[in-house]
Every structure is written in structure tokens, then in C-alpha cells.
Amino acid sequence: MIQVTAFKWVPPFAQGSVRDIRVRWALEEAGLGYDDHLIAHEDRLAPEYRALQPFGQVPAYRDGKVEMFESGAIVLWIAQHSDALMPADECGRAMVMTWLFAAMNSIEPYVGQLAGIDIFHAGEAWTTERRPQVEAQLRTRLADLQTALGDRKWFAGDRFSAADILMTHVLRDLRHTDILAGYPALADYVARAEARPAFQRALADQLKPFRAAEAARPELVAG
């Protein structure tokens, strides 16, 4: 049985963003069952967990053949064994891998900078000058991304692929802003991906333990 590590609870701003959702989504699209191994934040420091995930993050992945960490690598591993996430032809596979890495390397750093400012450094004096610069850089990159998408439904071709899991997850981290509204093709793209039943199942599975923790300890929501 495939096992994916995930957190028992995270603050509301991180719910739906923790990167185990990428792996959950890929497994759902591929039609593969899995167990989620839930850990508390303090468990990240345990030597046995660091042996599996040296940075103390989630997810980590086991499938009886391999043990892996890094969500992008795990999604690519799953995709390489799934017709649902990776086309059979060589050119198609190359394009999926290209856009998968583009999501992580050409888009995510810009999104991450803005999200970091807004969520972890909101109100700090230095952000008054820095945030407009970061947003301008992000908007330039989003304009390029929208141009590249063009009239296609998905980034690597006519069908959904592993690349769209990564790209959608990255763009979802802008949902605390209205920035994507300025890029209607990208906003429609994200909405189209989020409407997929596999995404909805992955999101529900990630949120389920969070809701259980909050029901048991209401102060988690209030705090």
C-alpha cells in the first residue's frame, strides 16, 4: 500500500496548500489507493522521520518499491507509471516534464515571495517598499504564463497531466489575493482544474484530519 505523510493539523491559511495535496491529487487521478500517515509538527524533528524526510517537511512517500520526498519528484514518479498523468509518446512526455518544472522553477518562486510577505510578514515596515516590487515581478511572469497557455485547456496539450497538478497548486497560493482576476485565462484554468473530482477528493482528504482536530480543540480555529 502506498503511504503519504501529512500533517495532523495546520493553521487555516495553510489548509489546502500543504504540498501533500499534490501527491494526493496525483494518486487520485491515477486511480491509486493510499494511506495517509499523519504526523504532528513536533514529529518532524524525530530522527526516524528525518531519515525519511531530511528537512522535516511533508510529504514523504513509500510505495513498497521506493521511498521518496519532494512533492514534485513524487508527482513525476507517479506520472511516469500512469497513463492518466503522462502521455505515451516521447514528445508529449517531454512537454509534461517541461511544464511540471516550469511550475516549480519559473512560477512558484514569484508566487512564494508574495505569499510569504502577505502571510508571514504582513504589516512589517520593510514590506511597504518590497511588496510592490514583488507583485510587479509576479504580474510580468503571470502575463507570460497566460500567453503561453493561449487557447489550450491544459499546459502540456489537449489533456490534463501531471504538469497541471503542479501549476494549479502553485497558482492556488494566490487565492488570498485578487491577482488572478487580472489574468482571466489563468483564473479559468485554475477553476477548471479545481472542478476535477480527483482534486475535490484530494482536498477533502487533506482537510478531514484538520476538521477533526478543530472539532476536538476549538481553540485551534480561534487562535
Image (cartoon, rainbow, N blue to C red):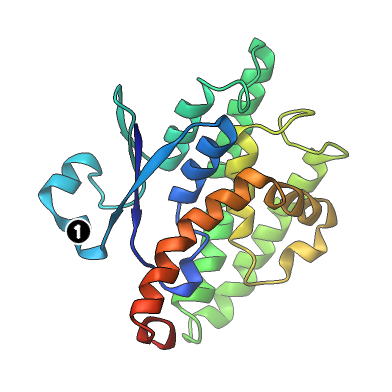
As drawn, is 129 to the left or to the right of 48? right
**Could you tell me residue 133's position as x and y percent?**
62, 68
- At a point 36% along the width and 72% down the height, the residue shown is 213
Residue 65 at x, y percent in the picture? 30, 21
Q: Secondary structure at mark 1?
A: helix
What is the quadrant of residue 149 in the picture? top right
Residue 38: image x %, image y %? 30, 54
Farthest left residue in view: 47
Label tally: 1
Lateral position of residue 71 relative to residue 148, left or right? left
Question: Few, some or many C-alpha atoms within 10 Å of disc 1 (few <14, some 14-19, many ≥20)?
Answer: some
- Give the answer, above or below, for where 209 lies relative to 87: below
Residue shown at 57% from the left, 50% from the top: 201
Frontmost residue, 49 versus 145: 49
Residue at the outermost right position: 151
The residue wearing badge 1 is 43
Q: Residue at x 84, y 57 (%)?
A: 184
Quadrant where the C terminus sits is bottom left
Say which residue appears at 19% left-offset and 47% top-offset: 49
The image shows residue 21, relative to residue 95, as above or below, that is below
As drawn, 3 above or below 215: above
Q: Quadrant of residue 222?
A: bottom left
Towards the viewer: 194 or 53: 194
